[in-house]
Image (tube, rainbow, N blue to C red):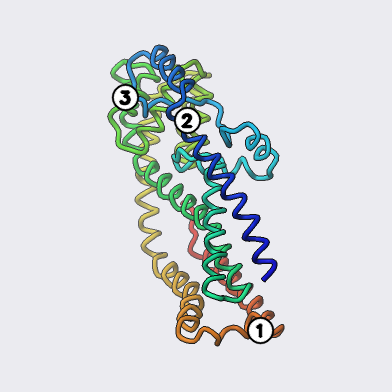
């Protein structure tokens, strides 16, 4: 129990510090005089007048608005991947805010397990599950958003192609997509147009777009535009052909997804069944499964079962993961 108490103290202290930092960062990013001054300057630099929500204020992403926490986060491994995850979900959160939420949920899990008088292993599992819950949610949001952009991309390419045939410049075509297309692809193309309008090269702005939206179809679009800028060619015709190719690929992927639906359903049921049964047993008879986490033989059985489940999930995932 002394270990749980020590974890309470450490996570509670970190949660309070990050909560205070998040409140200060929220104020400095929204209502501080410096932010208002930058907003006025950016509105003066643009061709037209943009709403406040349409303007990206910071071109260099920060992990935290507090310099001390920023220096600490920069030294952490894999922190760039976490920031890229936030960028790809379209979230306005910073890494410091995300970590503060994770720590608060982990601390809440420890408190809940202690109040319910669970065993230390069960309490640690609950705290770990709540700790990674925001990361799983972000991963799900990124997948949903990226898939939505992939579905909207052919229509956006057709719009750019028609704008180029009508005599508009390529940045103006991007602006038309940002103004007339649906979200979330409209905000991404609008951000690309703003970057070009603020002085970035077209190639750099398009590469930033491919970083925010990591799908192969968009990378093909970026590659086609970059090659056209260097060598020349009929970009409007190329984008129209690319849009048709993406639509045909989606049709083929839809057929394959229908054929693989049965395998996916079996994988979901077989993966969730042991945890569901264990949860029901824990509710009906809380002391029945304690031996699995206290007896050495029970611990080895649990570890073996988890490893075998992971291998089975990997095998089923490789079977139903068909690339188009």
**In the rendering, at what x and y percent does residue 239 appear?**
39, 30
Identify the residue position indicated by label 2 in the image. 29
Q: Find residue 250 and name its label.
A: none
- Horizontally, is 28 left or right of 40 in the view? right
**In the rendering, at what x and y percent does residue 126 appear?**
55, 67
Separation of disc 2 and disc 3 at Cα?
29 Å
Q: Find residue 298 and name its label.
A: 1
Quadrant into which the N terminus falls: bottom right
Name the front one of labels 2 and 1: 2
Q: Secondary structure at mark 2?
A: helix
Q: Secondary structure at mark 3?
A: helix
**In the rendering, at what x and y percent does residue 188 appear?**
41, 33
Upstream in sequence: badge 2 or badge 3 = 2
| Dot 3 and dot 1 residues touching (CB under 8 Å) | no
Which residue is depicted at the point 58% across and 62% down? 128
Which residue is depicted at the point 66% across and 75% down? 303
Residue 174, by quadrant, is: top left
Badge 2: few (under 14), some or many (20 or more) residues near its Cα, within 10 Å?
some
């Amino acid at each position: 129990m002394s270990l749980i108490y020590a974890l309470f103290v450490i996570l509670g202290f970190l949660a309070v510090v990050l909560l205070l930092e998040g409140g200060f960062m929220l104020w400095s990013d929204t209502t501080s005089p410096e932010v208002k001054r930058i907003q006025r300057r950016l509105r003066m630099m643009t061709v037209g007048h943009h709403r406040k929500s349409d303007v990206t204020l910071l071109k260099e992403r920060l992990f935290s608005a507090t310099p001390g926490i920023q220096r600490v986060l920069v030294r952490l491994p894999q922190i760039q991947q976490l920031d890229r995850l936030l960028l790809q979900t379209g979230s306005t959160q910073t890494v410091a805010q995300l970590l503060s939420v994770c720590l608060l949920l982990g601390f809440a899990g420890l408190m809940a397990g202690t109040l319910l008088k669970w065993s230390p292993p069960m309490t640690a599992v609950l705290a770990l599950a709540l700790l990674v819950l925001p990361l799983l949610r972000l991963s799900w949001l990124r997948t949903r958003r990226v898939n939505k952009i992939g579905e909207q991309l052919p229509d956006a390419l057709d719009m750019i192609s028609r704008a180029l045939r009508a005599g508009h410049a390529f940045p103006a075509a991007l602006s038309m997509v940002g103004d007339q297309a649906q979200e979330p692809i409209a905000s991404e193309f609008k951000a690309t147009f703003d970057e070009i309008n603020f002085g970035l090269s077209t190639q750099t702005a398009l590469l930033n777009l491919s970083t925010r939206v990591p799908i192969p179809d968009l990378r093909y679009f970026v590659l086609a535009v970059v090659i056209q800028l260097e060598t020349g060619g009929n970009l409007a015709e190329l984008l129209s052909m690319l849009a048709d190719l993406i639509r045909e690929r989606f049709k083929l992927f839809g057929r394959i997804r229908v054929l693989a639906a049965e395998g996916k359903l079996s994988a979901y049921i077989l993966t969730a069944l042991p945890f569901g049964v264990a949860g029901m047993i824990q509710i009906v008879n809380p002391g029945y499964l304690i031996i699995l986490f206290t007896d050495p033989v029970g611990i080895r059985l649990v570890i073996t079962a988890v490893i075998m489940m992971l291998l089975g999930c990997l095998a089923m995932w490789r079977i139903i993961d068909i690339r188009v």
